[in-house]
Amino acid sequence: MRAPIQKNGPSKAESFTTSVVPQSPPGPQTAPQTAPQITQPVEQPVSAEEPAPAESSSAAGKVSNAVEMADMQKEVEQPADVVPQKTPSLAGTSSSEVPRQPPGPSLRMKAVKKTLKQMLADAEHGVGDFASTAGSDVAETSADIRKDVSTGGELGQDITSEAEAGKEAEAVDIAMENATSDTGTVPAEDQAAPPMDNATVRRIEIETDLDQANSLIMADNYKQAVDLLEPLLKDKDFPENMREETLYTLASAKFQLYKDDLSTHYNEVTGAFDRAINFNPKSMRVPEGLLNLGLINMKVGNIPEAGAYFNILKKKYPDDDNIPYIEYYWGQYNFDKGDYRKAADRFQYLVQTYPDSKVVREASLGLANSLDHLGFEQQAYQIVDYIDKRWPRYYVESPEFLRLSGNIANKLDKFDKAKSDYWTFYNLTPDAPDMDIILARIGDIYLREKKPEAAKDVYSFTAKNYPDSQGGLVSNMRLAEEGIYDDPDMNQMFTVFDRPYNVRPVEIYTKIVKKFPKSALAPLAQLKLAMWYIYVQQPAGKGHGRGRGLLQTLSQEFACQESPGRGVGCF
C-alpha cells in the first residue's frame, strides 16, 4: 500500500523520483593516506663511464663555500641566541642517490671579527670565483664531448647515428615533394571527395526533411509535419522506396491533427489511409491502416463501416498485433454510450484472451471502471489491485488511475488506501478537473477517522478555493452541520438545528437551492430546508405547511440509494 501523501508534505512523487545508485560491495575501510613529499637531490651530470666526482671537486667546493658564506650572513642578521642550521654538502654524492655521510668535522668557517662591509665583499669575491670555476668546467666538458666524438666513443656514436637518421628522413621528404611536383598527383588520403551529383544531393535533402517531419510529429506539431510531407510526396525526385513509409506517416499525422473534428475532415483523413494501403496492398502495414479506418468511422458514428473494416482485419490478419485493439475500441465505445455491461464484457475478453497485448493495461482499467459503474466494487477493487501490482508506476503515466482507485477504496471503507490515493492524485495534478470533489472526500475521510480538526482544515481550504463548485458547496454544508448528513432523517437534523446560534445551515441550503438549482446537491438541500421549516415551527401556512409540503415532494424525488456516508447526492 502506498504511504499517505499529505498536502505540503512528502508526496509519493518524491519517492519514485529518487534514483538508486549501485553500491560497491563492502570491504575493509582504510584511512586516506597523503602521498609523501619526495624531494630529489640535485645531481651533477655524470658520464656512465666516468667515476663519481670526489669531495675535492672545485664546483662542489665552491657551492659549499657559497652556502657557508650565506649562513654567515644570516648569522650576523639573526639575534645572538639563534643558532644557525647546518647545511649538508652535496659533494661526494653519486648520480643515483645521496648517501648518509658519517659525522665529521664541521665545514663551517670559524667566526672572524670583521665588519659587515668586509664580510659582504668577501662573499661577492667567493661567488665570482665560483662563476669562473663553473665556466671552466663547462669548457672542459665541451672539450671532452668533442674528443669523444672524434675518437669514436659511445657518445660520439650516438650523436653520429642521430645525425644520419635526420639526413635520411630529410631525403625521403625531398623525394616525396619531387614526385608530387613531377606527376601532379596527391596521395589518396589527401585527395578531396568527388563532387556529388544532383540526384544524390536531392536524396539527402529529402531524407533530412523526413527526419524533421518525424521530429515534429513526436513534438505534437502535426500541422507543420503535414505541411512538410505533402510537398515531398509530389516531388518528382522522391525515392520510391521511401514513399510507403511517408504515406503512412502523413496519414497518421492527419488523423492526430483532426481527431477532434473528424466529421469535417473525414474524406481527407480516410483518403490518406486509402492511398497508403493501395500503394502496396501486400505491405505489413496494411493491418494498421485497416484498424485506423475502422476507428475513424466509429468516431464519426459510421458503425456499420467501422465493423466492416474491423472484420476484414480479423479475417485476413487473425494473428496481427492490432487485433486486440478492436476489442478495446468496442469496449470504449460501449462505455462512452453508458452501456457498462457490454463494455465490461469487451474489456474482460481482451484481458483474458490477450494478456500480453500492448493495450491490456488500458483494458484492465476500463474493466475496473465498468465494474465500478455497475456497482461491483469488490470485483473492481480486485482489478485495480491487479493493475497496481503488475504496473506499479502506471499512476505516474496516468494519474487518473489514482482517482478511480481512491473512489473504489472509499466505497469499500478502505479509508487509508483511499486517502493515500487521493492525496497522491492531488499532489501530482492539483489542477485536474473536479479536484474540489476529491478534497471534500478527503475531509469526509478525516471525519470518519475521528479527526475533526484535520477535516475542518480541508473543508475550509476547499470552500475558500472552490466556492461555487460542488466540492466547495459540500464543504460549506459540512462546516455548517459539523458532520456528514447525506441520508438525513428528522431526528438527526433536529439535533443539528438544536445547536446554539446555529443558523448557518439554512443559509447554505437556501444558497444551493437558489443559485444552483440544477446541482446534484439541490434535492438534498431542499429536503434539509423543509426539515428546517418544520423545526422552527412557524405559523400554519408558512412554517409547518411549507415544510411538510416540501417533505412530501422531496421524499418522492430524492432518496439516497447509496450506503450512509457515500453521499450520492453530494458526489
Image: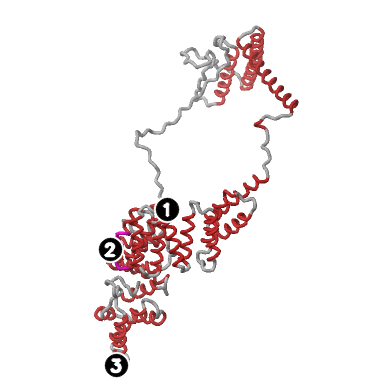
Q: Give the number of the mark in front: 1 or 2.
A: 1
Prevailing secondary structure of the magenta residues: helix
The residue under label 1 is 320
The residue under label 2 is 378
Looking at the rendered structure, the kind of residue marked 1 is Asp
Residue 472 is left or right of residue 193, and the answer is left
Considering only vertical position in the picture, is 569 above or below 89? below
Query: From mark 1 to mark 3, how far is it between C-alphas?
Result: 76 Å
Q: Give the number of the mark in front: 3 or 2.
A: 2
Query: From mark 1 to mark 2, how far is it between C-alphas?
Result: 34 Å
- Quick one: quadrant of the N terminus? bottom left
Q: Quadrant of residue 551?
A: bottom left
Query: Is residue 381 within the magenta segment?
Result: yes
The residue under label 3 is 540
**Earlier sequence position, callout 3 versus callout 2:** 2
Task: Mark yes or no: residue 11 visible.
Answer: no
Residue 350 lies, in percent from the top left, at 36, 58
Query: Is residue 330 within the magenta segment?
Result: no
Q: Secondary structure at mark 2?
A: helix
Task: Mark yes or no: residue 157 visible.
Answer: yes
Numbered range of the magenta stretch: 374-383
Q: Secondary structure at mark 3?
A: loop
Residue 38 lies, in percent from the top left, at 49, 25
Instruction: Please give the name of the residue rendered at 36% of the width and 72% of the height, measured from the top-left corner.
Output: 475
Considering only vertical position in the picture, is 275 above or below 183? below
Q: Residues within 10 Å of mark 1 (few under 14, many from 20)?
A: few
